[in-house]
Image: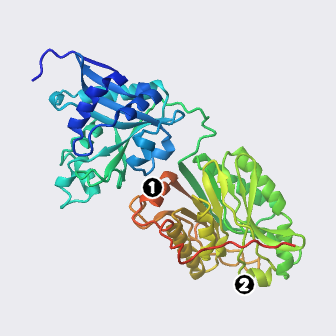
């Protein structure tokens, strides 16, 4: 037991290097010992406040070394070498918004006094003073080698969390309010005791105030509201638009970021067409209202502060009919996605042609794509959207029979798995005998996720009661997608064999 302790915390200077080297050599004898002098000197020069030592009288007994990093970069998978530059210099980003804990070590003679907590608290206070987002650290698991034959690294982490196993580093970090956010592979390959593994640990600064406003910040938890719409007879356009506003209002009340309508949701207006016997004229009559619906639904998106996917509507342009969906953002801007693959019925009876543009749209709640009904049955489209970093795919659909619906549903589920994204499908129900081809509907709207441990066991986030008018909500965690794409059980996007096949989008000559 030590006596006559006189402990003090201060910043490290270059003159401390001989003592620092002796301490690091004794503690890190299994992974190469101390950093060279020029490494420590550069750390002190680049981030002097982040280099902290604990001294007893004039003897260094504990050390915490840190650098500044970009949070987005180092809260994702990385290795220790990603922090190292030329000639073993530590890379320091002076504009970084997080602290990276490089090392914390206590002299073996001073263990048992909980002195490491003092260094951690000093780091936390530094994080608060500099208004940084968080402290990140790659934590070794040096006792893992003793258990590697009977458990995986993840099982080992769970055992440490449950205090069935004591790990000198991880157990200590967990007791200091750090959270394990992921397992890092090959973090430090030379670390034989940890078998190259490390935990990515994070301590969040709850007092952090970002320079950007809340309006400019990126949402990571997104709520989608799908409207399973019932086809019903209407007397006027105003009557149907009141129903649209009712549902947008209701979905907005539940703080949704998106409201999605089905394909051809306003088709009941065809019942007002002067020529009911001519389907081509009836759909042209319906198209005469599309501009009004687009404008008014955009105004509703702004008024109710929600992004609206307008299902789809017929659009007559230069005497050519298209099936188009609009994204009405809550900031008042509008994007469009035309249906690319046209069904035999649409082509034969309504003389609709396919569009040739395919885009992912930025919103304040993620990057989204839209595929209208039949389009989701073509995997090439989903993959092209995934290559543009799509987070959520919206699929407004309209099917009359269950087998038609199941084609859409099962293909949508496949798109979610193969493209590691969320897919929201939304359809209509009810019947409209007075309108040709609208006499029956079949729908069960749903939200699908990738199929992995982070999601529901059946990869279905939520779904409606079949053939019942209702609203469905689902909360979508965009950060889970990042983890799935980097460290999922499988990596469908990363593991494609580009050496064997490619997907090329052709440019269309519109001349």
**Mark 1 vs mark 2: in front:** 1
Separation of marks 1 and 2 at Cα, in angstroms: 40 Å
In this rendering, is residue 274 above or below 393?
below
Query: Residue at image x 20%, y 58%?
Result: 148
Q: x, y (%) of residue 474? A: 52, 56
Mark closest to the chain's N terminus, 1 or 2: 2
Q: Secondary structure at mark 2?
A: helix
The picture quadrant where one finds residue 168 is top left
Whether residue 238 appears in this view of the structure is no
The picture quadrant where one finds residue 134 is top left
Circle 1 packing at 10 Å, graded few (<14), some (14-19), many (20+), is some
Tell me the quadrant of the picture where the C terminus can be found: bottom right
In this rendering, is residue 17 above or below 91?
above
Q: x, y (%) of residue 326? A: 73, 60
Query: Residue at image x 27%, y 44%?
Result: 32
Q: x, y (%) of residue 156? A: 24, 53
Q: Is residue 262 left or right of residue 90?
A: right
Q: Is residue 77 left or right of residue 30?
A: right
- Residue at label 2? 344
- In this rendered view, identify the residue nearer to me: 240 or 223: 223
In this rendering, is residue 340 above or below 309?
below
Q: Secondary structure at mark 1?
A: helix
- In this rendered view, identify the residue nearer to me: 251 or 132: 132
Whether residue 359 appears in this view of the structure is yes
Circle 2 packing at 10 Å, graded few (<14), some (14-19), many (20+), is few
Q: x, y (%) of residue 497? A: 51, 73
- In this rendered view, identify the residue nearer to me: 63 or 403: 63
Query: Residue at image x 22%, y 15%?
Result: 57
- In this rendered view, identify the residue nearer to me: 424 or 130: 130
- Residue at label 1? 483
């Amino acid at each position: 037991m030590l006596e006559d302790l006189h402990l003090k915390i201060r910043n490290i200077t270059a003159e401390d290097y001989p003592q620092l080297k002796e301490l690091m050599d004794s503690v890190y004898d299994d992974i190469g010992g101390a950093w060279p002098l020029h490494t420590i000197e550069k750390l002190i020069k680049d981030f002097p406040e982040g280099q902290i030592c604990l001294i007893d009288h004039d003897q260094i007994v504990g050390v915490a070394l840190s650098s500044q990093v970009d949070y987005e970069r180092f809260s994702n998978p990385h290795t220790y070498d990603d922090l190292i530059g030329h000639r073993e210099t530590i890379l320091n980003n002076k504009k970084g918004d997080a602290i990276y804990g490089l090392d914390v070590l206590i002299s073996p003679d001073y263990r048992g006094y909980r002195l490491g907590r003092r260094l951690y608290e000093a780091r936390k206070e530094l994080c608060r003073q500099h208004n940084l987002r968080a402290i990140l650290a790659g934590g070794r698991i040096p006792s893992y080698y003793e258990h590697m034959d009977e458990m995986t690294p993840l099982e080992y982490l769970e055992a440490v969390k449950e205090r069935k196993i004591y790990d000198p580093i991880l157990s200590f970090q967990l007791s200091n309010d750090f959270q394990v956010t992921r397992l890092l592979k090959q973090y430090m390959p030379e670390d034989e005791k940890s078998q190259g593994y490390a935990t990515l640990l994070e301590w969040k600064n709850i007092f952090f105030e970002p320079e950007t406003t809340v309006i400019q910040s990126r949402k990571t938890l997104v709520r989608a509201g799908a409207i399973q719409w019932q086809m019903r007879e209407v007397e006027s356009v105003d009557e149907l638009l009141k129903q649209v506003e009712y549902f947008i209002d209701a979905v907005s009340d539940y703080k949704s970021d998106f409201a999605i309508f089905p394909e051809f949701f306003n088709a009941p207006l065809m019942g007002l067409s002067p020529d009911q016997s001519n389907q081509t004229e009836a759909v042209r009559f319906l198209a005469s209202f599309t501009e009004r619906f687009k404008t008014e639904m955009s105004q509703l998106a702004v008024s109710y502060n929600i992004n609206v996917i307008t299902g789809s509507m017929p659009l007559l342009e230069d005497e050519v009919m298209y099936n188009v969906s609009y994204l009405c953002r809550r900031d008042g801007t509008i994007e469009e996605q035309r249906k690319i693959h046209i069904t035999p019925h649409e082509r034969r009876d309504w003389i609709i042609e396919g569009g040739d543009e395919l885009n992912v749209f930025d919103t304040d709640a993620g990057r989204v794509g839209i595929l209208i009904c039949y389009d989701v049955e073509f995997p090439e489209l989903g993959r092209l959207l995934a290559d543009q970093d799509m987070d959520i795919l919206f699929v407004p659909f309209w099917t009359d029979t269950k087998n038609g619906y199941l084609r859409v549903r099962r293909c949508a589920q496949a798109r979610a798995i193969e493209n590691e994204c969320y897919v929201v499908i939304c359809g209509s129900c009810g019947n409209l005998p007075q309108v040709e081809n609208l006499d029956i509907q079949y729908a069960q709207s749903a939200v699908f996720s990738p199929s992995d441990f982070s999601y529901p066991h059946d990869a279905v986030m939520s779904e409606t009661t079949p053939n019942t008018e209702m609203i469905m909500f689902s909360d979508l965690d965009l950060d889970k997608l990042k983890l799935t794409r980097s460290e999922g059980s499988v990596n469908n996007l990363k593991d494609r064999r580009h050496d064997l096949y490619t997907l090329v989008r052709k440019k269309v000559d519109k001349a």
